[in-house]
Structure formats: C-alpha cells, structure tokens
Amino acid sequence: MKRSSSSVEFPPCPQSNQTPTHTLRNRAFDFAILSLLFLGFLFIFIATPSGTLLTPLLSSPSSQCNSSTMHKMAIYQDELDEVLAETSTENKTVIIAVVNKAYVEGDKSMLDLFLDGFWHGDGTQGLVNHILIVATDPVSYNRCKFLRLHCYKLEVEGINFVEEKFYGNEDYYKMMWRRTQFLGDVLKRGYNFIFTDTDILWLRNPFSILSPNETFDFQIACDGYRGNELCYVNNGFTIVRSNNKTITLYDTWYAKRNDDVRQTEQDVVRLLIENGFFKDLGLNYRLLDTLYFSGFCENSRDIGFVVTVHANCCLGISAKLADLTTVIHDWKRAKKLFVNETSRFKWSKHKACKKKN
C-alpha cells in the first residue's frame, strides 16, 4: 500500500550565467545614475581652479596666456623684480636712468632729448628696450608710461624730488645717495647695470667696446681722463657687474653718506679708491677714457671713437638742452665724413653752458 506525502516545491535555483530580467533593469538604472553623478563631478572639477591638470587642455589660447602671465608674476618678490626681468638683456644687464618732473616737462624735455640720442646713434635704437626709467614723482612716472618705456617709481619719503636739483644743494645730496642705495639693491637682485644720467647722449652702442672687458667689476666715467692717474670720477655713467665684491662696495659706499655732509657720493667713491678699499676687496675697476665716454668737461679727441657725450661741467637744464642739441647736429655732420677725416673734426663750442656757468 502506497503512502501519501505532501511537499512544497521551490523554483529551481538560477544558474550562475543566468540573470533575471528585473535585476538587469535595476543594474542599468544604477549605472545611469552613477554616470550622471560622474559627469556632474567632472564638470565641477573642470570649472573650478582646482582642475589645473585639465584646464590647459580645454582653455582658449587667450586664457592660457593669462594663466601663464599670472604664474610669471607670482614668482617675483615685488614690482622691481618684475620690471628688471622685463627690461634686462640676456646676460641680465639693465640700462638705468633716473628722472623727476623737471626732466620730463617742457617743449623739449631732457628725457625726450635723451631718447633722441638713441634714435640718431649707431646701433643704439634697440637699446631703448633695455632702458629702465626710474621716476621719483608721479608726473615723471606717468610721462614714462605714456612713452611706453620700462618704468619704475622710486618711493622716497621726506624728500621733494620734483624740482631740478643743483650741485651743492642739500636735496641734491639726498637724491644722489638715494640713487646709490637703489643701485645697490639692483646688484643684490643679481642684475648688472649701466647707469646713465639723462643729460648723456648715446651715439654708439657701448657693448661692443665693453664686451672684451668683462673682467672689470666696476667702471666709471671721468670728467678729465689722465691715464693710470686717478681722475675726478663722474658717477653719472657707471658700468657695474653684480657680484659679492660690488654688493659690498655699494653697501659700504652708502653707509658712509653721513661721515661728512659736505661730500658727494662721487667724493666718497673716489676716496674708497684712493684709500685702497677697492684693492682690499679684490675689485677690478677701470676709469673710462674720454676718447670714448666724453663730456663738456673734456671733449672726445676723435668723434670717430666717441660713444657717449655728457653735459657735465654745466648748470641748468635749459643750457644742457641747448648744447646737447648742438651735439646732435655735430654728430649728423660727422656721420657724413670719411673715416680718415674724423680725427680732424672739431666740436662746436658749448656756448649755452659757458654762459650759465
């Protein structure tokens, strides 16, 4: 006799390679949600500054340029670092000139005539790109910016640099010493410089003459050249290489500003040479021959070699402007001469400066 039994039947277990239809739909929905979340996160990542790795690939050329500029500016310590880097030559040399309001105003300003010299000179036009105009007041700074030059405003407290300063005036001494301090700062930032007064006309490119003499740490103009004999130096034109010796020189030089209030910065540097300070530093210096770097104190002996002409031994902007304009006329006349005729060339007399003096 057969027994009866009751049982509960379960659906067969699915095989490992089989997936119910409703499970597939759930997974597809989850994947779609995750994809949308990922795309949203990616959009936010790209749109914010944190997406720096992707931004260069997706940004426009103009935005890449702006980003590069911002990065370049960020590496500078201050504005002076930036303008020195923009102005310098490949070997980190800058031509530096200091101006104030008195030197940028008038129908024909001293700054205008200074720039004219580069225009009329031989091989000098491109040097304008390496001139840093250091302005001591808002008017001269704005004029510099208008001329689209490299400009830096020198902040000075307690000194009125707006008006013309004459030799022997108290403000003149203060201005010269502030200039010395500033140039020392340029050396500390690793830049060589040629400092030039703006009452100097650059008629030839000096680098061709100076390049064989890179062993000199410090070169300075003379009012009258006497060969190996120490001349009366003129700090209106100096060529200085940045190294530990010249940095020490400028620190010591500036520190002596209060030793004798009757001494100019030129007097002090001459004493440092006389007293053997340069020798003790192991600093190689050269006094520049007026044959090449001349002035109204002593004209170049041959216009065929002259590089610069300085309106030294002359008082007053108006007198300097008049006689430097005559120098430009002389230069144009001399350029028409044959090479063998330059030694016989005669400079015009500096009439305006003689009347002023």
Image (cartoon, rainbow, N blue to C red):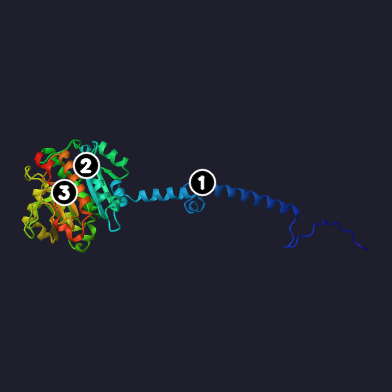
x, y percentage for residue 195? 20, 50
Residue closest to the eye, 62 or 156: 62
**Residue at the disc numbered 1:** 47
Within-10-Å neighbours for mark 3: few <14, some 14–19, many 20+: many
**Residue at the disc numbered 2:** 110
Asked whether the beta carbons under mark 3 and mark 1 sit within 8 Å of each other, the answer is: no
Asked whether the beta carbons under mark 2 and mark 1 sit within 8 Å of each other, the answer is: no
- Going by the numbered disc 3, the residue's amino acid type is His
Quadrant of residue 91 within the rendered picture: bottom left
- Going by the numbered disc 2, the residue's amino acid type is Met
Query: Is disc 3 placed on a helix, strand or loop?
Result: strand
Residue, x 28% and y 41% (percent of image)?
A: 144
- Going by the numbered disc 1, the residue's amino acid type is Ala
Within-10-Å neighbours for mark 2: few <14, some 14–19, many 20+: many
Within-10-Å neighbours for mark 1: few <14, some 14–19, many 20+: few
Q: What label sits on residue 319 in the rendered view?
A: none
**Residue at the disc numbered 3:** 310
Residue closest to the eye, 170 or 307: 307
Which comes before the other along the chain, label 3 or label 1?
Answer: 1
Real-space Cα distance between discs 3 and 1? Answer: 59 Å
Query: Is disc 2 placed on a helix, strand or loop?
Result: helix
Of circles 3 and 1, which is in front? 3
Which comes before the other along the chain, label 2 or label 3?
Answer: 2
Quadrant of residue 157 within the rendered picture: top left
Residue, x 21% and y 47% (percent of image)?
A: 329
Quarter containing the N terminus: bottom right
Real-space Cα distance between discs 2 and 1? Answer: 52 Å
Q: Is residue 79 visible?
A: yes
Which comes before the other along the chain, label 2 or label 1?
Answer: 1
